[in-house]
Amino acid sequence: MEKTQAYQCLGTIDPLPDLIQRTNRYLLDLRLAKWITQKQYEQL
C-alpha cells in the first residue's frame, strides 16, 4: 500500500492495528449479544 501524507504527520504511530482490534471486539460483542448471527459474523 502506498503511504500517504498522513503517515508523515503520524510518524511511527500506526493506528490501524488498534482500530482493527477494536472493530473485531465490537463485532464479537454484537454476536455475543445476539444482535447478529454466527453466519453474519463469519461473513464480515
Image (cartoon, rainbow, N blue to C red):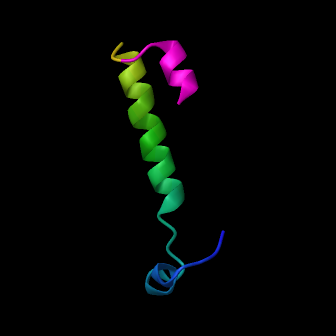
The residue depicted at 50 percent of the width and 23 percent of the height is 41
Query: Is residue 42 part of the magenta span, yes or no?
Result: yes
Q: Which residue lies at the image location 54% right of the left edge and 56% below the top edge?
A: 17
Taking 26 as reference, is 38 above or below it?
A: above
Q: Is residue 26 shown left or right of residue 39?
A: left
> For the N terminus, which image quadrant?
bottom right
Q: Going by the picture, which residue comes out furthest to the right?
A: 1
Residue at 54 percent of width and 14 percent of height: 39
Residue 28: which quarter of the image?
Answer: top left
Number of on-image labels: 0
Q: Could you tell me residue 31's position as x and y percent?
A: 42, 19
Residue 20, image x and y in percent? 50, 48
In magenta, the rendered stretch is 36-44
Task: Tell me if residue 28 comes above or below residue 34 in the rendering.
Answer: below
Question: Residue 3, relative to residue 28: is it above or below?
Answer: below
As displayed, is residue 10 above or below residue 26? below
Give the overall secondary structure of the magenta segment: helix
Place of residue 16 in the rendered image (x, y in percent of width and height, measured from the top left): 51, 60
Q: Identify which residue is drawn at 56% across, 25% down.
A: 43
Q: Is residue 17 magenta?
A: no
Across and down, in percent, residue 23 comes to 43, 42
Observer-nearest residue: 16 or 3?
Answer: 3
